[in-house]
Amino acid sequence: MQPDINQSVTARTDSGAEFPDAKKAEEALLLASSEDEYMNAAQLAFFRQRLLNERAELEAHLSEVKTAIASHERDSDEADQASFEEELRLSLRQADRESRLINNIDAALQRIENGEYGFCEETGEPIGLPRLLFRPTAKLCIEAKERQERKEHHFRKARGE
């Protein structure tokens, strides 16, 4: 039976292994897992928690952006207003990206619930722990993602973009 990751992290860090923090220790334990343990209960729990934490951070930031927009005074001079509008434009672009990332996180959480998380939507092959640690919302393995990007580049080039 697979040991609980939280217990393993404590045991590893208490036994003298040098990890900068608990997050790095957990990642190291995941990467040390054998291939036949891929997407076991402990790994799924790790990624689920990581996705939930990232979602909460994004929601908090979006709330801050909304508050900043709502609290802006419109009676300032033209230079202040122009500066605010530029900041607003940048904040709205970032908020849009973060909103799309929240949708991707929700989709990844749904894949965890469906038992499909960690496997390529195109090929069915494992995506791989290093890729998921880097991008927990990944839906494609590296090879499928590279094919997709080459295809997108080819179509953009054909359209003259």
Image (tube, grey):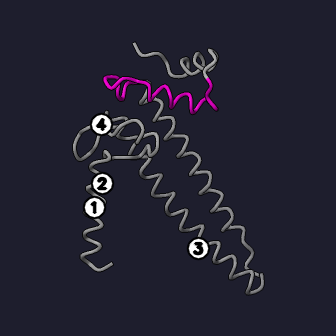
SS under mark 2: helix
Image coordinates of residue 31 in percent, x first then y, are 44, 29
Seen from the viewer's position, the closer of residues 136 and 61 is 136
- The residue that label 1 is drawn on is 150
How many dots with numbers? 4
Residues shaded magenta: 18-41
Question: In the figure, is residue 97 to the left or right of 74?
Answer: left
Q: Quadrant of residue 41?
A: top left
Tag 2: residue type?
Glu
Q: Are marks 1 and 2 in contact (CB under 8 Å)?
A: yes
Labels 2, 4: front one: 2
Tag 3: residue type?
Arg
- The residue that label 3 is drawn on is 89
- The residue that label 4 is drawn on is 126
Mark 3 is surrounded, within 10 Å at the Cα level, by few (under 14), some (14 to 19) or many (20 or more) other residues, namely few
Q: CA distance from mark 4 to mark 3?
A: 39 Å
Q: Residue at x 31, y 23 (%)?
A: 36
Mark 2 or mark 3: whose residue is earlier in sequence: 3
Looking at the image, the residue that sits furthest to the left is: 123
SS under mark 3: helix
Residue 157 falls within the magenta-colored stretch = no
Q: CA distance from mark 1 to mark 2?
A: 6 Å
